[in-house]
Image (cartoon, helix red, strand yellow):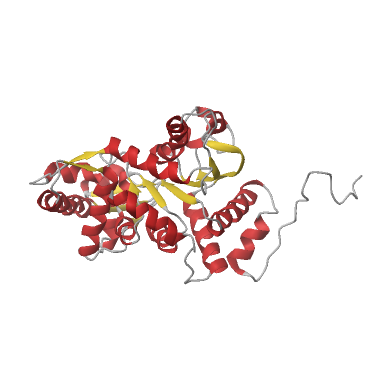
């Protein structure tokens, strides 16, 4: 019994070993291990399959990624065409402006920090790092300049949220802040949806702006998102989802599948053909953030029971750098996804429309 090399229908777990073939090879070996190391290796394999195919790849950004310094990795993914649509929290779509403007973050010991003292010293805390309150507030005043710019340049009384973020990216790029996620999305024609934009720095920027410009139409946003998904969801090339954390970005991407089904007017589900989620949320407390991408969402038709779906329960600040380094080593530093040009042309037409 102990000598059987395999059992029908099951893969043999491979003992972990060291190698000299970089992070790319490490992730491949981790796929044969167990627990979350195995899941991370599976996520790497699935992401490569997405990149090698022609499906549309949507990514959701939740958690405090920008303040933790993860934003350059997201911008790099956009540049390479490894993601085609970005759905973000307001903080992740704006707080990267801080470091782009030269504002430093400082590390603290979260177990021994005195938050009352931080308040007195005018420092805002993000778990184990802090930033100057003055610099953060100044960033919000800086972004107020965009509202004033938009008021002077946008002729309509309303603007879709995704177009609002496109114009913000254009403005940031012109301000010399081309490394921000919004500016990178603008340059590459990647739609940046921020469905909960008032929940973050933009609200304060709006409040202090002298001229506030057009009303942002978030319901028009969803209409545009559905047009994009309807074009690509099966029987089209298909859509895939990558969730960094959960929250509103995850729900926004997933719920498009149920709405596209309703638009098409038939009983067949229109699920994403593949999904990766990296999170530390726990499914047993009922929140969507920890709901598995191969479990309850299938009952809604959001993901496919036959899809390439994997949940990685890990800290994004560990998992995302490893995955990006693995992609860099696997494809090389100058590689751009071949399907990117075709997809970008389609998306740009819908964004302009």
* In this picture, residue 260 sits left or right of residue 323: left
Which residue sits at x=47%, y=58%?
82
Name the spot of residue 1 as percent of width and height, x first. Answer: 92, 44
* Picture quadrant where residue 253 is located: top left
* In this picture, residue 25 sits left or right of residue 103: right
The relative height of residue 164 versus residue 301 in the rendered view (above or below) is below
* In this picture, residue 32 sits left or right of residue 177: right
Which residue sits at x=39%, y=37%?
248
Is residue 70 visible in the rendered image? The answer is no
The relative height of residue 184 versus residue 13 in the rendered view (above or below) is below
Name the spot of residue 130 as percent of width and height, x first. Answer: 31, 52
User: In the depicted view, which residue is nearer to us: 112 or 66?
Assistant: 66
* In this picture, residue 118 sits left or right of residue 66: left
Name the spot of residue 148 as percent of width and height, x first. Answer: 11, 50
Farthest-out residue, left: 210
Is residue 264 visible in the rendered image? The answer is yes
User: In the depicted view, which residue is nearer to us: 95 or 187?
Assistant: 187
User: In the depicted view, which residue is nearer to us: 177 or 271?
Assistant: 271
């Amino acid at each position: 019994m102990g000598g059987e090399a395999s059992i029908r229908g099951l893969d043999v777990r491979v003992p972990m070993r060291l190698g000299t073939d970089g992070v790319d090879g490490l992730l491949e070996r981790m796929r044969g291990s167990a627990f979350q190391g195995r899941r991370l290796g599976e996520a790497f394999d699935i992401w490569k399959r997405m990149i090698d195919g022609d499906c549309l790849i949507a990514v959701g950004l939740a958690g405090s990624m920008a303040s933790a310094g993860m934003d350059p990795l997201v911008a790099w993914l956009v540049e390479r065409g490894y993601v085609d649509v970005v759905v973000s929290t307001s903080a992740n779509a704006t707080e990267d402006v801080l470091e782009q403007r030269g504002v430093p973050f400082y590390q603290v010991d979260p177990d021994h920090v005195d938050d009352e003292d931080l308040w007195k010293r005018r420092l805002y805390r993000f778990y184990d790092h802090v930033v100057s309150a003055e610099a953060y507030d100044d960033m919000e005043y800086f972004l107020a300049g965009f509202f004033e710019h938009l008021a002077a340049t946008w002729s309509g009384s309303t603007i879709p949220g995704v177009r609002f973020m496109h114009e913000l990216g254009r403005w940031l790029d012109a301000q010399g802040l081309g490394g921000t996620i919004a500016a990178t999305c603008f340059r590459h024609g990647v739609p940046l949806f921020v469905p909960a934009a008032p929940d973050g720095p933009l609200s304060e920027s709006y409040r202090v702006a002298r001229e506030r410009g057009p009303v942002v139409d978030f319901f028009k946003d969803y209409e545009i998102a559905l047009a994009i998904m309807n074009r690509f969801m099966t029987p089209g090339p298909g859509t895939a989802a990558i969730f960094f954390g959960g929250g509103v970005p995850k729900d926004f991407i997933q719920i498009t599948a149920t709405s596209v089904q309703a638009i098409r007017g038939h009983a067949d589900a229109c699920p994403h053909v593949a999904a990766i989620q990296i999170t530390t949320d726990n499914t047993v407390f009922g929140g969507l953030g920890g709901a598995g991408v191969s479990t309850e969402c299938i009952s809604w038709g959001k993901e496919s029971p036959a899809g390439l779906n994997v949940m990685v329960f890990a800290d994004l600040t560990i998992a995302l750098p490893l995955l990006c380094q693995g992609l860099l080593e696997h494809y090389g530093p100058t590689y751009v996804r071949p399907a990117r040009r075709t997809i970008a042309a389609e998306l740009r037409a819908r964004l302009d429309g």
